[in-house]
Image: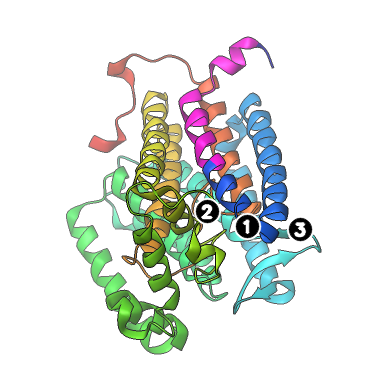
Amino acid sequence: MNLSFFKKIDWWIVVSLIPLMALSLTTMSSFMDAGGPLVYRQLLWIGISFIAFLIISSIDVSFLKQSKVLLFIYVIGLSLLIGLIFVGSTNKGATSWFNFGGFSFQPSDFVKLTLILVLAKYLARRHIEIRAMKHIFITGMYFVIPFLLIFLQPDFGSAIILFAIWFGMILVSGISRKHLLILFTAGLALFMVMWTFVFQEYQKDRLRTFVDPLSDIQGTGYNAYQSTIAVGSGQLLGKGVGYGTQSRLNFLPEYETDFIYAAISEEWGFIGSIIILSLFGIVIIRILVIGYQMNSNFELLYAVGVALYFMSHVLINIGMNIGLMPVTGVTLPFMSYGGSHLLVEWMALGILMAMRRQSRAVYKDDSPDVFLK
């Protein structure tokens, strides 16, 4: 790795992510007995993930434009999801993990990145004809198969993320209003069928709680209720590191994963929340800027997909932390405890940096403009 390699890294993104991870680690470390092991393991995963980011950033990723390669990666992703049915580890009612003793792996994280690559390839070659309904149907099939496999685990949160990635990417590619209306109608009909025949009772309870979070404080609404208390009790400047009573006294469940935002907000207050949102905003904007500077539709659409991936995770996780979204188990990127999602997130950025490094300079008039097609 020479000096020119490091110049091609977008340090705005890296520097923005460092305080996000530091905030997360600081909050985890404040919870005494559990904090120590969590912090050490998370530090290890941060190191592994960042090394993976640098390695991927330095290689030639043009092979990802080959249909055969992407099909192979897609099949691997589906195989992993199918494998969960037979040898997956069940935790809190969801069979979403492969457990290898001291290490667990969640395939849905890898599948999200795979879907972005597959859709970017397909839509880049057909962005002019995307208004044809058949292309929406074909991309829908790429999305629906992993969606159903993940939904049946059941992992409602990851299934929503897949939908957000697919819908956002076809929307950017130029879907017509007529087809958008058809999709909305079909989606509403599908939801009604799934509510009647597919949704389990606890999933229905979560959606009911979404409409009225305080309807069952002692039951399905407990997590959301405790989370909103934690966020609100932080007020402007927070209670201070180590003084988050909701987390320390175990009122706030899953403070290191699903509700890390609430735990941080309680300790760092409104100011800390604004810092988090601002840093995520910088990361997402920089990803889109890099995508626009690329010289092919594939690279642009990939950047859009990655931005959608991070943005949907952030919106859904923070939404459920402040009582505006149902509790779905969606992680907060780069901040929630866990290795598999952290590794995939840095890998996604590594691919983007590699594309940026290999992309030749283009003039504004020659730059791809998928948004207007």
What is the magenta range?
A: 3-22
Residue plotted at (39% across, 48% down): 311
Q: Mark 3, residues whose alpha carbon is within 10 Å: few (<14), some, or many (≥20)?
A: few
Disc 3 residue type (three-letter)? Phe
Helix, strand or loop: magenta stretch:
helix
Q: Is residue 201 left or right of residue 28?
A: left
Secondary-structure class at tag 1: helix
Cα–Cα gap, marks 2 and 3: 20 Å
Indicate which disc residue 77 carries: 1
- Answer whether residue 126 is visible to the viewer in this image: yes
- State the image coordinates of residue 93 (x, y, percent, origin top left): 59, 79
In the rendered image, which residue does mark 3 sit on?
A: 103
Disc 2 residue type (three-letter)? Lys
Closer to us: 248 or 75: 248
- State the image coordinates of residue 34 (x, y, percent, origin top left): 68, 60
Residue furthest to the right? 101
- State the image coordinates of residue 117 (x, y, percent, origin top left): 51, 44
In the rendered image, which residue does mark 2 sit on?
A: 112
